[in-house]
């Protein structure tokens, strides 16, 4: 049964691993140049505290390859669900070949286990190798860009793509099992996977771990550069304790009860007099600081790997639930 299933899957596997070889060659040729560029331009510039030109040059290097790799890892799990998961069993029902296996002493559970297990292993190997290569190649750029929690990059690095691929394959597989038609199953796998990724990015990931909070006294000497605040007062990047790679949820001016200043209070605290702009700025900061403080809500960069493990575990857990459904469904009378 295993040999027969492997023969059925050999074309898809050959195409996938052939593409991996081509990608590996391209990354092996271009990757060392990025490392050399980082070591010779970005590392030395840190002694002069002027790395803007060096980091821009590095992040602009091989731009088309960067875009292609990001796009590739975004769509590969969906493609696995559509073109591996959905046809893996739906095609058997369409052609009627499943009857041959069932009449040769192969139980439905064993038939399902072999096909599903083979697909999951192939998906993990392909996606894992691709993610490993892309993460290695992009490491110099990721080091200077410092945005590990960016939704676009979080899902195309390290462990998360493996969880996505397993879930997408199992979702397509279950759709094929229930619908017994390849095209509808492919469409269902695509829609279901995109919906799951959207829910995770927009709603679930920000709440996986309780964020940290930092409280700062408002001062008029340094505007906050992390985002918009009601009056624009805050602390500098060197003193605020928030690293460039941290995921900042919000930064707000609030009182002890957590309430933001009202528009009426802002108008009274920050009058537009005839003094200089700096004097008006200082006056506004002083009046605000009497009742309010700056509250920053964030996830530290050190939690990146925890989020990666959590997200992969969640998608594998969802896949396990779908697999359980498949084994229950296959026992139903045909």
Image (tube, grey):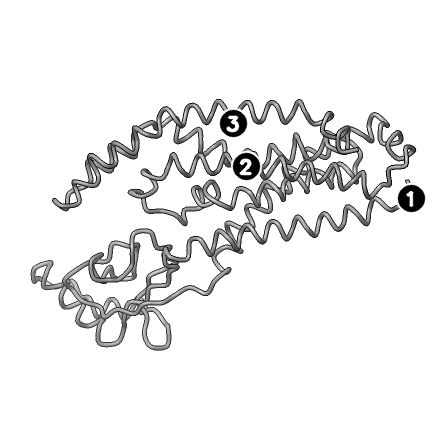
- Whole-Å distance between the Cαs marked 3 and 2? 10 Å
Write the residue at 90% across / 36% down. Answer: 105
User: Considering only order in the chain, which callout, 2 or 1, is on the residue closer to the N terminus?
Assistant: 2
Q: Disc 3 designates what residue?
A: 20
Circles 1, 3 touching at the beta carbon (< 8 Å): no
- Whole-Å distance between the Cαs marked 1 and 2? 35 Å
Mark 3 is surrounded, within 10 Å at the Cα level, by few (under 14), some (14 to 19) or many (20 or more) other residues, namely some
User: Considering only order in the chain, which callout, 3 or 1, is on the residue closer to the N terminus?
Assistant: 3
x, y percent for residue 171: 68, 42
Write the residue at 38% across / 34% down. Answer: 137
x, y percent for residue 254: 32, 70
Q: Disc 2 designates what residue?
A: 127
Give the quadrant of the C terminus: top right
Q: Which mark, by number, is residue 333?
A: 1
Q: Is residue 112 left or right of residue 18?
A: right
Quarter of the view holding residue 168: top right
Label 3: element kind: helix
**In this rendering, is residue 78 above or below 18?**
below
């Amino acid at each position: 049964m295993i040999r027969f299933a492997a023969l059925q899957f050999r074309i898809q596997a050959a195409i996938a691993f052939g593409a991996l070889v081509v990608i590996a060659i391209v990354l092996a040729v271009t990757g060392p140049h990025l490392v050399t560029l980082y070591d010779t331009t970005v590392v030395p510039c840190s002694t002069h505290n002027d790395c803007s030109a060096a980091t821009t040059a590095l992040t602009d290097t091989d731009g088309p390859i960067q875009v292609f790799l990001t796009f590739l890892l975004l769509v590969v799990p969906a493609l696995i669900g559509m073109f591996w998961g959905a046809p893996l069993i739906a095609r058997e029902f369409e052609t009627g070949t499943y009857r041959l296996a069932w009449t040769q002493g192969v139980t439905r559970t064993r038939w399902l286990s072999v096909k599903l297990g083979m697909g999951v292993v192939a998906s993990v190997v392909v996606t894992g190798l691709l993610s490993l290569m892309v993460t290695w190649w992009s490491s110099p750029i990721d080091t200077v860009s410092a945005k590990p929690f960016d939704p676009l990059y979080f899902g195309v690095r390290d462990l998360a793509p493996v969880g996505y691929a397993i879930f997408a394959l199992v979702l397509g597989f279950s759709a094929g099992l229930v619908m017994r038609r390849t095209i509808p199953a492919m469409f269902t796998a695509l829609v279901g996977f995109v919906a799951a990724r959207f829910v995770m990015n927009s709603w679930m990931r920000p709440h996986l771990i309780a964020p940290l909070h930092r409280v700062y006294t408002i001062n008029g000497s340094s505007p906050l550069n992390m985002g918009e605040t009601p009056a624009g007062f805050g602390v500098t990047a060197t003193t605020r304790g928030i690293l460039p790679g941290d995921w900042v949820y919000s930064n707000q001016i609030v009182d002890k009860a957590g309430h933001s200043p009202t528009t009426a209070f802002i108008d009274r605290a920050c009058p537009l007099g005839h003094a200089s702009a700096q004097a008006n700025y200082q006056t506004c900061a002083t009046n605000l600081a009497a009742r309010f403080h700056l509250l920053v809500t964030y996830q530290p960069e050190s939690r990146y790997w925890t989020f990666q493990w959590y997200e992969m575990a969640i998608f594998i857990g969802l896949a396990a639930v779908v697999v359980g459904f498949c084994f229950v469904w296959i026992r139903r009378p045909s």
